[in-house]
């Protein structure tokens, strides 16, 4: 099934990934997201996205949700995130909408780059991941 292959690509990503529903509840995430926030994946699923953002950043996150609802995507949005140990980090958020077969919005796939980890080594790792992912997604699309 093509969606399973695409999901596996995101789940194995070196960047943080999460899928949310249309009201901002986390439906799925990868191990990179869970580890960076200091939680087990089971502690994340079912929680609102605002649980991983300090209160002083709620307005910025809410603005991101508004942009997403209006445009279907969020690009290069800088957000402060909070880990379980209460430490924070700046992340760069990218989100694209997910739709059902009737074209109703059902959620989004979101990729978050931890800006504190943006060194040459990680940038190379990200570039390699996205190049390989792009090729995998082309192959998946050709199979459909």
Image (spheres, grey):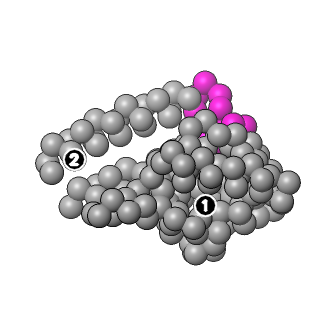
The crowd level at tag 2 (other Cα within 10 Å; few <14, some 14-19, many 20+) is some
Q: Secondary structure at mark 2?
A: helix
Q: Quadrant of residue 113?
A: top right
* Left or right: where 33 falls relative to 12: right
Q: Is residue 114 magenta?
A: yes
What residue is at 65 percent from the left and 40 percent from the top?
A: 77
Going 14% across and 48% down the picture, which residue do you hit?
Answer: 143
State the image coordinates of residue 2 (x, y, percent, origin top left).
23, 56
In the image, residue 127 sits, relative to residue 136, either above or below, namely above
Give x and y (percent) for residue 49.
65, 63
Of the numbered discs 2 and 1, the one sitting upstream in the chain is 1
* Residue at the image position 74 percent from the left and 42 percent from the top: 90
Image position, residue 23 (x, y; %): 57, 67
Give the residue at the far left of this rendering.
143
In the rendered image, which quarter is residue 83 located in? bottom right
Q: Give the residue pinned by disc 2.
A: 140
Residue holding disc 1: 34
Q: CA distance from mark 2 to mark 1?
A: 27 Å
Say if the magenta span includes residue 13.
no
Q: Place residue 48 in its image quadrant.
A: bottom right
Res. 57 mark = none
| Relative to 117, 100 lies left or right | left
Residue found at the very far top of the displayed protein: 120
Q: Position of residue 26 (x, y in %)?
A: 56, 67
**Residue 25 visible in the shown view:** yes
As helix, strand or loop, the secondary structure at mark 1 comes to: helix
| Circles 2 and 1 in contact, beta carbons < 8 Å | no
Question: Local crowd at mark 1 within 10 Å, few (<14), some, or many (≥20)?
Answer: many
Range shown magenta = 113-122
The residue at 22%/47% (across/down) is: 140
Q: Main secondary structure of the magenta part?
A: helix
Q: Is residue 30 visible?
A: no
């Amino acid at each position: 099934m093509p969606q399973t292959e695409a999901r596996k690509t995101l789940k194995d990503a070196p960047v943080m990934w999460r899928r949310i529903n249309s009201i901002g509840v986390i439906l799925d995430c990868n191990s990179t997201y869970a580890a960076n926030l200091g939680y087990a994946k089971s502690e994340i699923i079912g929680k609102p996205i605002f649980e991983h953002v300090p209160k002083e950043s709620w307005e910025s996150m809410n603005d991101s949700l508004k942009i997403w609802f209006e445009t279907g995507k969020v690009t290069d949005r800088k957000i402060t995130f909070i880990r379980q140990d209460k430490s924070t980090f700046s992340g760069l958020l990218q989100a694209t909408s997910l739709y059902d077969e009737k074209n109703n919005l059902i959620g989004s796939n979101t990729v978050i780059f931890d800006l504190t980890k943006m060194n040459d080594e990680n940038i190379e790792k990200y570039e390699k991941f996205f190049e390989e992912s792009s090729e995998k997604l082309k192959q998946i699309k050709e199979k459909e």
